[in-house]
Each structure stands twice: as C-alpha cells, then as structure tokens.
Image: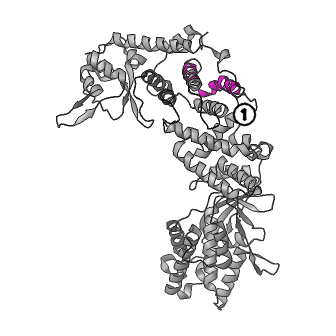
Amino acid sequence: MSKLNVDQKTIMLLFSDKKSDFLIPDYQRPYAWEESQCQTLWDDIFTFAFPDNNSDKFDSNEEYFLGSIVTFENDRNKKEVIDGQQRLTTLMLLLRAFYAKFGNMQDENSKSTRERIAQCLWKTNEFGQPNLNILKIDSEVATDNDKEEFLEILKTGIVNKDQKSNYAKNYRFFQEKIDNFLSEYPSYFAYLPARILGNCILLPIEAESQDTALRIFSTLNDRGLPLSDADIFKAQFYKHYSTKNQKDKFIEQWKDLEEITGRIFKPLNGTPMDELFTRYMYFVRAKQGIKSSTTEALRKFYEKGKYSILKQDETLSNLKILVDFWHDVYNQNPERFSPNILRKLFILNSAPNGMWTYFLSVYFLQNKNDIGQLEDNKLDEFLNKTIAFVWAFAFTNPGVNALRTPVYAEMINIVTDKIVNFDEHKFDEHSLRTAINNFEFKNGRPITRSMLTWWAFKDDNQEIPTLNTIFDIEHIFAKKRQENDKSLSNTKLLEALGNKSLLEDKINIRAADYRFSDKIKYYKGFTNDKGQHKTGSIITELINLAATKTDFTEQDIINRSERIVNEFIAFLKQKNLVK
C-alpha cells in the first residue's frame, strides 16, 4: 500500500522548510491564472486578515485554508508538483511582490517579515540567510515559453510593460494591490504578509510515486484539468527531442497536434490527445503481434522500455499523419475521399461502438502510400466488410468487449498484409436472422440508429449530409395514431425496424399530425400559411413513400422490416461473412 505524508502547514512552515525544493515538471500545463482569479485570492485573504477592514478584529487562532498541493519526490530529490502548481506559482508571485515592497523599510516588523519571506523564496544557508541565486521553485514545463520570465521575476522582482505573460500580468496586479494597500492602511502594512505567512495554510500531500500522486490528483481535483496520459507522453517526447537539439520544433509540432485533436476528437474519457495516442496504440500493438482481448491502460502500454515507443523517430510523424487522416474523415474531405468512400465513412460514424475507429487507424497506417493516401477500391472493400461485420456482431454478441476478439485478430492480419476476412467468426444465417427478428429496436439502442443509417445511406443516390447534421428516429406509423385508432393488431410493430427511419431534427412533426397523410407534407416540404417554405427531408426513401403512398399500414411495416433484414443478410453474403 502506498504511503502518504499529509500534514497541514502554514505557508511559512511549508515554504521555508529546507527540504522544500519544488519543481513544476515538464509534463504540466502552462501557468493559466488570470487577473480575476488573483483578485478573488486577494479579496479572500484581505477579508480574512482584516475582518471589517479592522486589523484589531483579527483572531490569531483562526486559519484560512488555501487548498492542497500534491507532490512526490523524484530521483533528483525535488518535489514534483502534480496538483496545485497554479496556486503555488501565484503565491510565490504574491510573496515576491511583498518582498520587493519592503525594500528599504527599516522598522523591525518590516525587516522581520522581509526575512521570513526571503526564506520562502530562496534557499538559505545554515544561518538562515537566503542565497538570492537559488530559488525554492523551478519550472520545466515543456510548452510554457514564459517559464524563464517567471523565474526571472522571482529572482529580480522586476517586470516591464512589454512583458505580456500571465506571470508578468499577475505580478503587476499584486504590485498595484500592495501599493494601494500601503497607501490606505500604512500602519497595517506589515500585518498582511505576516498573517498570510502564519495563518494561511496549505495541505501538502506527499506521495511516494508519480502514479500515486496522479491518482490522488484525479480524486481530489475539482477545479483544474487533471493531468492526462498525453501530458506524461509530452514530457518524454520533450526530453527525447531536447537531446537532439530539436525541442523548439517538437513544441511547435505538439501544439499543432493539440489544436487539431481538440477540434476533431470528443472522447467520453480522457483528452483529445489521449484519443490520438489510443488510436496509434492499436497499430503498434498489432505490429507487436498482440491480439489479447485485454487492453492495457494507455500509459502502461507506452511506458514499457522506458517509453521506447515514444523515442522512435517515426512515432511523432506517424501521429501527425494519423491525425491529418482523421481530420479529413470528420471534415468529409472530398479531395482525399471519393463520394463512395465518404458514404461508407458516414455510415460508420453511426456504428454501435467506437471499435471501427481503431480498426481503420490500423488499416490506414499500414496501407497508406508515400503521400498518405489509400487505394480507393481496397479501402471500399475494407469499409464495407467492417460495416457488415460490426453491425451483425452487435446482434449476436452485443457489447464492445466481445468485438475485441475478432477485431484484434484481424488487426494483425492487416499489419502482416493479409486479407481481412473474419474467417473464424462467420455468421450462421438462420441464427443471425432469428436474432435480428427477435430484437427490440428501441430508439435508445445504438444498433437501431446504426441499422437505419445503413439502410438510408447505402443507396448511391442518397445525398450525404455533413456529420454534424442531427437526425431523430421517426416512427412512420405514429405512436399517437395507435393510441387514437388502435389499428395495429400487433403493437410491437411500433418499434419494428420497418416502422422507423432517420428524419432531420429540424423537421418537427407535430403530435397532432399523426396520420401518414399528414406526415407527407413534412417529408416532401411545404409552404405554410405565412408563405414560409419548410424544407423537406433529404432521406430519399421518405420522399418516395410520400410520393407513392397515401397510407402506411401494418402490412407495410411487416414488408419493410423483411426487406431491410433480407438486404442486410444479402450484404453479409456478398462480403463472404456468412457460413
């Protein structure tokens, strides 16, 4: 069991401790506090130190809690800050501003307070005298171009108007606040920093390892963004490229990756950059011949061999190539993909789970040519087979965990240039047909939308909308109709696949318009009594139904359900996925 050292301390006790040697590590994010946050901190501390603006009302037994700082001692005997770097940095700037203001003040209280602050900012000798060249905090944040400015401010106490970093802005803010305070309350001046040092407390949580510290941060943190796996990977990349004198180029590339992933990936868990590393991980593990259905945690996978994968020259370039590919997928780039491929990608975006994204990532990285392109006909066959298998498997083996076994095995086939065939997992036609016919196609079930999307968009004449187009699931035979006239002998047919279709969210069919004859105008589009034209659906099948039918009956639901299932089974047979 991991050991923790947890001992609530005043700022003075924590910062002046000779063992306090804080390091904001390279994988942390840049300093981001803004003036509004500094204002809140100042107001809270001032109100605590001078209740009702009266120094005499202060209770020396009272304490003000500033939060926690989570650290662990690294192999250089420095306390790496996992959580609390923003408040720690801000407090250092505040104390430095006070130290500078005390300057030449010679009264005993001012001199004493200045000496105490110095012990918090700088290393001291055995007589308690500060060495103004050695700070008690250092920053190695890889993507913070202003970290040297922070350290220089702490050393010199000087900023100029040209400096625009958050460090400089916040330091100037505290200087202004201190100047105003000295002007309004000159006799109280030494009391404020003294009360900050002696009565404002922090909770330092010292873990024995980075893993433990990160877990604690994830548990405690409710304000900032927790450190992600990608932050740790960034640090490893930074160290690697620093040894090659390419750190500036790396930082530029990393920021580019963050910008693109932030726009295109919306993962349920982790960060967009974590998602990119996850997609790349499946390619690497396939190359390593791993087909185990148990997937390691992302950081555990990459940290093997002291992060050897990240130290390979092709890794960063492969990540860039991979993110560019997915950027074009999600932006439906017609210069990269033919209309036929864009159609299949649109269908896959409605998949019952996200496994296809990993599968396609492996296929792309293995089969791309020198300019990052894929051969159209082979890609079309791969996408069709992926759609057919993933959709059918959702009926016979629901859940993404079951899908891992066949897909992981096929990933190895991909990287060894073998044909993807799912030979060991072909479907029995009777069993599959029975599973589909017995399935309840409720709207909340992912495969319901998946099947409706496949059915609507497999038609080459069907217009392909943008991926951000929102579709509802439409009951062609309305529930309200059944409530009113009870014309269905089998009420289960309301939720049958044959009674459902995609319909644009913007086409709002009123509950009162429950009859099929009333729905027709919404499917086709119409002009209302105000002369406004209401656009109809782009779903070709709905437009055809509106043009050819005056009613949609129980038998129509049955016939349409059979047609969808039959064509889906035929699709599987065409792709050689049926025994």
Q: How is the image coloured?
A: one colour
Splitting the image into 4 quarters, where does residue 305 fall?
A: top right
Task: Residue 88 in the image: state x and y as whole percent.
Answer: 64, 66
What residue is shown at x 71% (from left), y 51% (from top)? 237
Splitting the image into 4 quarters, where does residue 544 fall?
A: top left
Query: Quarter of the image containing the C terminus?
Result: top right
What residue is shown at x 55% (from left), y 24% (from top)? 380
Task: Residue 285 in the image: state x and y as whole percent.
Answer: 72, 34
| Up/down of 403 relative to 505, above or below | above
Which residues are drawn in magenta?
Answer: 387-416
Looking at the picture, which amino acid does disc 1 mark? Arg
| Up/down of 574 relative to 156, above or below | above
| Up/down of 40 relative to 350, above or below | below
Residue hosting label 1 = 285
Q: Judge left or right: residue 533 versus residue 156.
A: left
What residue is shown at x 52% (from left), y 12% (from top)? 569
Camera-side residue of 447 and 30: 30
Q: Main secondary structure of the magenta part?
A: helix
Magenta region includes residue 388: yes
